[in-house]
Amino acid sequence: MNDQQNPYDPYYPQPQIIGYDAYGQPVYQQQPAQAPQQPAYDPYAGQQQTAYGYDPYAQPQAPQQPQAPQQPSYDGYGDRQGQGYAPQPSYDPYESYGGGQHCHAAVPAAPVTAAPAGVPGQRPAPEPPAPPPTRPAAPRRAEADDDRDYRTEQFSFIEEPDEDSEDVIDWLKFTESRSERREEARRRGRNRVIALVVVLVLAVVGGVGYLWSAGLLPGTGDSEQQGQAAGAGPQRRDTIVLHLHDTQGGSTSTALLVDNSTTKQGTTVLLPNALAVADSEGAATTLGKSVEEDGSSGTREALDTLLGAKIAGTWRLDTPYLENLVEYLGGIEVDTDTTVPDPQGKKGADPLVVQGEQQTLTGRAAVAYATFRASGEAEAKQLQRFGQVVNGVLRKMPSDATNATGAVEYLQQIADPSLPEKDLGASLAKLAERAKTGAYKTALLPVGQDGALAEGAGDSVVKDILGGKATALDASGVPRVSIKDGTGEDAVEAAKVVLINGGYAFVGGSKTESRAKSEVVYGDDAQKATAAEVAKTLGLPAGSVTKGKPAGTAAVTVVLGRDYEIPGAS
């Protein structure tokens, strides 16, 4: 510990140590007095003290040189020296610990010079003090300062930079940047949600617009307009004619299998055998007779001409082949509308087909149900059962062309040249896909008693489903004539003979309400001359010819009244 250092005044002048006395005490250089300034009064001058009080063993000191009178000064404690004020004792850091030893801070002794040689213990006269530096250096901290509760550097926080403040600034920057990142993430999330909503709205609007333009929404137009809008042109259809030949009963059943790839809809159109068609010579006949007499090719051409629909080929399916096909598919399920007895069973045997929903039919049962027609039952009922069996077969048929073709080849039937097995398999695969997804229906072509197409059939079936148009023969061909009998008598057969002998094609006759005057109706102006010739042939006046709407596919329709004279009648 430096005995000459004032621990409470960092700017107190520090004397220079020039040596040590015989007792090991430091000897300090005397500070010379400054002439223009009032010299600082040494509170410890004239007293010989050691670092810890008076030295009882101190040797007599040499007399000091007299000094010029000095003005009283104030010590570090504000006490006036030279006026009877004794220096205050310094703070004893060991007092508070109660160690039993009462120690005072060392009072610096008066600076002395080194003792002359040969005189031990005698100090030389003091030298004039050196002028203090303009700004003395900060004193080195005493060892006693280590025991204090505070240090000088604790009060330098204003001048020295605080590292914690930089940490706080960094933390604020980090918090601000994290908040900005969160806000940016939320902004991007909102943008994504808005974009998704916009995409969904556009998809919905586009879908509705597509359905509207396609005419698939309810109340937006008929089926043909829907298909044309959806396909941006005419609908694309694949149509084949199916003939089921009953080898036991000798009857036939005919249907058109239509696949509309534009609307993705499949349809079975049932054709009654009474449908009036033209034979190979242009004469009027029925569909049933055409299948037996003209065969597949002649019947296909007749239907194509009558309905105005393009038929790709003919599939002739005899009942034994139908039975094998159903067995190959593992049976079919049909909602049967009647009970069918086993034709080969004994009296009282169980029926082959039981009426009910979701009835599983084997090959024999499917054939029996498709060809069954009860006594006095209309042909349309039997055709409906035939359509149910066809629909059940399509639901079990493979949906891929390869496997469907394999099922057709399994039958080993003689294929029609117009429809090879590969093409037939491809067509059946498309129809099977429609049937499995529920996009399949069955329709009956309506005809009158005369075999002609009923009113409205051209719009509901021919135009919408088949995409065709029922038209009469051209003027250059054999004119088709139909008859409606309003005479109150049976005059159809007599008029039919007259027309056929006159070179006209008879396409059917029917009864109508009794009327007085006869009419010869034509629809196309090109058929006006033909209508006049028909009236002349039947013996009707020229004034009976009128423009209107002929029945069915006939170019001219004759409505017989009571004024018509039946040939051979008395």
Image: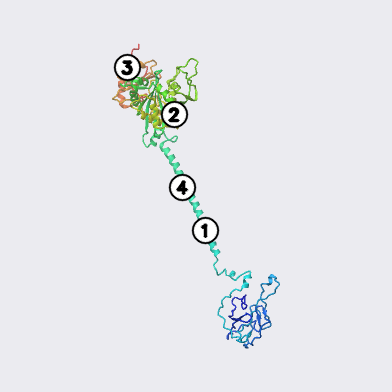
**Which comes before the other along the chain, label 2 or label 4?**
4
Disc 2 residue type (three-letter): Lys
Q: Count residues near mark 3 (Cα–Cα under 10 Å), then give few for <14, some for 14-19, many for 20+.
A: some
Which badge, 1 or 3, is on the more N-terminal residue? Answer: 1
How far from the left and from the top, in percent, is residue 519? 35, 21
Of 166 and 383, the residue lying toward us: 166
| Residue highlighted by disc 2 | 396
State the residue position of label 3.
498
Residue 74 in the figure: left or right of residue 404: right
Q: Secondary structure at mark 3?
A: helix
**Residue 384 marker:** none
- Identify residue type, mark 3: Val
Q: Residues within 10 Å of mark 1 (few under 14, many from 20)?
A: few
Please name the amino acid that badge 4 sits on.
Answer: Ala
Q: Nearer the viewer, mark 1 or mark 3?
A: 1
The percent position of residue 247, horizontal first and vertical second, equals: 39, 19
Real-space Cα separation, disc 2 to disc 4, in angstroms? 45 Å
Instruction: Determine the residue positioned at 68% across, 70% down.
Output: 97
- Which quadrant does the C terminus fall into? top left
Q: Quadrant of residue 453?
A: top left
Q: Is residue 145 above or below residue 251?
A: below
Which amino acid, mark 1?
Phe
Q: Residue furthest top?
A: 570
Q: CA distance from mark 4 to mark 1?
A: 31 Å
Q: Give the residue at mark 1.
A: 174
Residue 320: quarter of image: top left
Q: Are marks 4 and 1 in contact (CB under 8 Å)?
A: no
Q: CA distance from mark 2 to mark 1?
A: 69 Å
Q: CA distance from mark 2 to mark 3?
A: 52 Å
Provide the residue designation for mark 4.
195
* Mark found first going from the N terminus, 2 or 3: 2
